[in-house]
Image (tube, grey):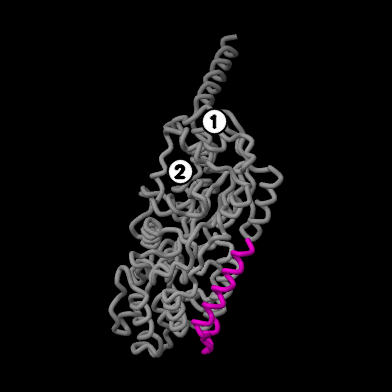
Amino acid sequence: MKKIFSILITILLVTALAACSSTTESGKDTSNIEVVSDMEGKVRISLAGWQLENGIDAVTGQETVGFEEFLKNEFEPRYPNIELEIYQVPWENAQAKQTAMLQSKDVDIIYSGGAFAAQWMEQGLLRGIEDLIEDDSEFDGNIYLEGIWENSYSTVSYDGERFGLPAVLGKRVTVYDKQLFEEWGVEPLSENPSPEEILEKAKKMTGKNPVTGEKNYGLYFSGKALNLDTFVALTHAFGAEGAEGSLDDLKNIKWKLNEPEMEKVLEWLAEASQYPPIDFLNEQGAENFGTEMNNIAIALNNAGGTVMGEYLSNDNKEILDRYEAVLNLGPNGEGWVAMDPFVMAKDAKDVKASWEVMKFLTGYETQKWNYDNYKATPTLVDADFVPKEDKFSKKAMEIAEISPSVLMDEANPFFSSEIVPAVNGFISNAANGKTPDIEKFLNDLQKRAEKWSANQ
């Protein structure tokens, strides 16, 4: 009898200890994590491209913590009564699939491309969040980089209504190879290089390398960019507005595509197209940039991914020191800033729970996890988890802090459908020695823009 009683006591003790345990299945101790809210609810989330399961980083070989385990470790202890239903969609068809989910009312919050989000808001598929922000005394939008919080069309509608929270920042910085500069005897780029400085130094380093004897190219930029990132940076640099007005009143946009400032943008592109490898027209030719075999001196709107991958996987400090990041082409370093947000469906079933989840998924814990595991550039002012070695992310965040949104942006329907292919065609012709008449080119584009607006 005593033996049975002893066994029962042991079982009860083990059960009690298990009930008091604050350790997840992965072994993470969550006892120091305070509950944020006892709110009950269910939130359906659609994620474009996020990795759900644990895995191995293909570049560094390091283990990665997937989104599902991250939620167990960080979200569930804070929001124990909110159930999450996760849907993953590939980037290739994210817009179509997530649009269908919004239309069928099968989703509450979405992570996707910023341009997609802007279009969904315009189509009436998303819910504005101004009232949620106003009613939430604990929420502070100042945690996000000012440039994207105040201006990004990915989270602020054409008429100024906020509909999303910034989650992941795109990296678009100017990167140059210090070793090639030394071999050519050219002064390094300044911290905020002007378009003129870029051209001058790119021209000097296009040709036969005086030290190695190999063919070098002074410059690289995408000649087929869907967002025209270099073109947008140049509009900042030369003060070429392109248009005045608001994207919520397309009919009354005042187009300024054939003004002298825009001519300077195209003149720059025409000359710059002489300095990259010809495959830049197909977004190729820079495969060795960021490696020891590099033959390109300057890369515009680069992410530094190859450099950081080599540094992280092999602790290659030499390659990290060889490549330097500086600001974009605008007068203060402005450029085109890509940002992907979390947004809420217009017909979200549980608005309060969805808002709590949106805040968490764009907050410090999630952005730290996303950077630590997948090097997603944060949108936070206080991103202390980004080490000093990652100068590319830090420089991208510096650019995002100061870059305003402009009408020359992928959120502008005419920009995406007409200006992008026209300018890419201009670059292609220039690279092949057939530069179009710039004045005629811009006058034609201006007429098309005016006709387009008149038909809205």
Residue 382 in view of the camera: yes
Residue 431 in view of the camera: no
Residue lying farthest right? 104
Instruction: Establish if 191 lies above or below 371.
Output: below
Q: Is 378 left, or right, of 96 in this rendering?
A: left
Residue 140, image quadrant: top left
**Is residue 436 on the magenta stretch?**
yes
Picture coordinates of residue 295 (x, y %)? 43, 81
- State the residue position of label 2: 363
Q: How many marks can you see?
A: 2
Q: Can you say which quadrant of the picture contains the N terminus?
A: top right
| Depth order, front residue of 160/229 | 160
| Depth order, front residue of 165/120 | 120
The kind of residue on which mark 1 rests is Pro
Picture coordinates of residue 306 (x, y %)? 46, 68
Q: CA distance from mark 1 to mark 2?
A: 18 Å
The disc placed on residue 23 is none
Residue stretch rendered in magenta on the structure: 428-456
Residue at disc 1, secondary structure? loop
Picture coordinates of residue 335 (x, y %)? 42, 65
Picture coordinates of residue 330 (x, y %)? 37, 67
**Is residue 180 on the magenta stretch?**
no
| Depth order, front residue of 301/11 | 301
Q: Main secondary structure of the magenta part?
A: helix
Which of label 1 and label 2 is nearer to you? 2
Q: Can you say which quadrant of the picture contains the C terminus?
A: bottom right
Instruction: Establish if 404 lies above or below 86.
Output: below
The disc placed on residue 80 is 1
Q: In the image, what residue occupies the spot 47% across and 71% down? A: 231
